[in-house]
Image (cartoon, coloured by chain):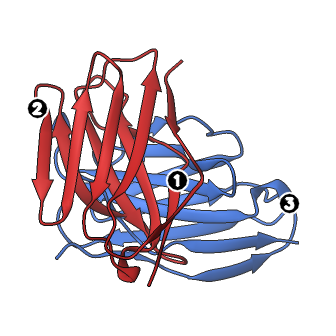
C-alpha cells in the first residue's frame, strides 16, 4: 500500500514564524500535492509538483512556497505565518503525470498559528 | 471558472437503505471523475474513478454514474451500514494533463442502526 507520511499531526506556531511542513511518500510517485482544508471551503490546492525541482501554483499559493529536492519528499513553507493560515494541511501523491491516477493522502497536519 | 457542487452537506439514512450522493459541475468537461471517502481526522481515501465515456462503475456495494449531458455524477451505497458513515468527496481533473484535481466540499453521510 502507498504510504504518505506527514511529519506532524499537530503543530502550533506563532505569527511571523517561518513554518515547514514535510511530506514523504514511499511509492516513487511523480506527482505530489499540498492542500488545505477548511470548514465550509473544502479542499483547496496550494501547490503541486510533477517532478523533482518542478512546481506549479494551485488555487491559493499566496503566502506559501514549496520545495521538492528529492522525488519522495515535498515540503510546504509558510514564509511568515499568519493567523489566517490556521488550517488542516493535507499532502497527497499520485503516479505519473498525464494520467488519471487516484491521489493518495496523508492524514494531515493541523496547524494553529497564534 | 470550474465549479463543482455536492448537493447537500449532510445526509442521514437508516441502515440497510441506499444512500445517493450527488455531484454537479459547471463550466467544464472533465475527462474523469473520482470519489473519495474521508473519516474525521484522516486524509481522504480513493474509492472509485469513472471516465467520461463510462456510464456506470461498480465496486462491491458502491455504484457511480456519470452523465456528461447533465454534468452530474451520482454515488450510491447500497445496503448501507453504520460503518459507511463518513464524508464523501467528488473530484474532477482540471489540468490538461489530468495532474491536479478540484474537490467538492463533500457530503457527510450518517447511517443510523
Question: The disc numbered 2 marks a residue on which chain?
Answer: B
Q: Residues within 10 Å of mark 2 (few under 14, many from 20)?
A: some
The tag on residue A83 is: 3
The tag on residue B54 is: 2
Describe residue B100's horizontal placement relative to residue B110 as left or right: left
Q: Percent from the top left, x then y, of residue B23?
A: 42, 38
The tag on residue A101 is: none
Residue at horizontal 64 percent and vertical 74 percent from the top: A110
Whole-Å distance between the Cαs marked 3 and 1? 17 Å
**Is residue A108 among what the camera can see?**
yes
Q: Which chain is blue?
A: A
Whether marks 3 and 1 lie on the same chain: yes
Question: The disc numbered 1 marks a residue on which chain?
Answer: A
Q: Give B93 or B105, whichever is nearer the viewer.
A: B105
Q: Percent from the top left, x then y, of residue A58?
A: 51, 36
Disc 1 designates what residue?
Answer: A35
Residue at horizontal 39 percent and vertical 55 percent from the top: A68
Residue at horizontal 26 percent and vertical 26 percent from the top: B67
Which of the 4 image quadrants contains residue A99? top left
Colour of chain B in the rendered structure image: red
Q: Percent from the top left, x then y, of residue A105?
A: 37, 65
Amino acid at each position: 500500500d502507498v504510504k504518505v507520511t506527514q511529519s506532524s499531526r499537530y503543530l502550533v506556531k506563532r505569527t511571523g514564524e517561518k513554518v515547514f511542513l514535510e511530506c514523504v511518500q514511499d511509492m516513487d510517485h511523480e506527482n505530489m500535492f499540498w492542500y488545505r482544508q477548511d470548514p465550509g471551503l473544502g479542499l483547496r490546492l496550494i501547490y503541486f509538483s510533477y517532478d523533482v525541482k518542478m512546481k506549479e501554483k494551485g488555487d491559493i499559493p499566496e503566502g506559501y512556497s514549496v520545495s521538492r529536492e528529492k522525488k519522495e519528499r515535498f515540503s510546504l513553507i509558510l514564509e511568515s505565518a499568519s493567523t489566517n493560515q490556521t488550517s488542516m494541511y493535507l499532502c497527497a501523491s499520485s503516479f505519473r503525470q498525464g494520467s488519471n491516477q487516484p491521489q493518495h493522502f496523508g492524514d494531515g497536519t493541523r496547524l494553529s498559528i497564534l | 471558472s470550474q465549479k463543482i457542487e455536492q448537493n447537500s452537506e449532510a445526509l442521514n439514512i437508516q441502515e440497510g437503505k441506499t444512500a445517493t450522493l450527488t455531484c454537479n459541475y459547471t463550466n467544464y468537461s472533465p475527462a474523469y471523475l473520482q470519489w473519495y471517502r474521508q473519516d474525521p481526522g484522516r486524509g481522504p481515501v480513493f474509492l472509485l474513478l469513472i471516465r467520461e465515456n463510462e456510464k456506470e462503475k461498480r465496486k462491491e456495494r458502491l455504484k457511480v454514474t456519470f452523465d456528461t449531458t447533465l454534468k452530474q455524477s451520482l454515488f450510491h451505497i447500497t445496503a448501507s451500514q453504520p460503518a459507511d458513515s463518513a464524508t464523501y468527496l467528488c473530484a474532477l481533473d482540471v489540468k490538461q494533463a489530468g495532474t491536479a484535481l478540484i474537490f467538492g466540499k463533500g457530503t457527510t453521510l450518517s447511517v443510523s442502526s
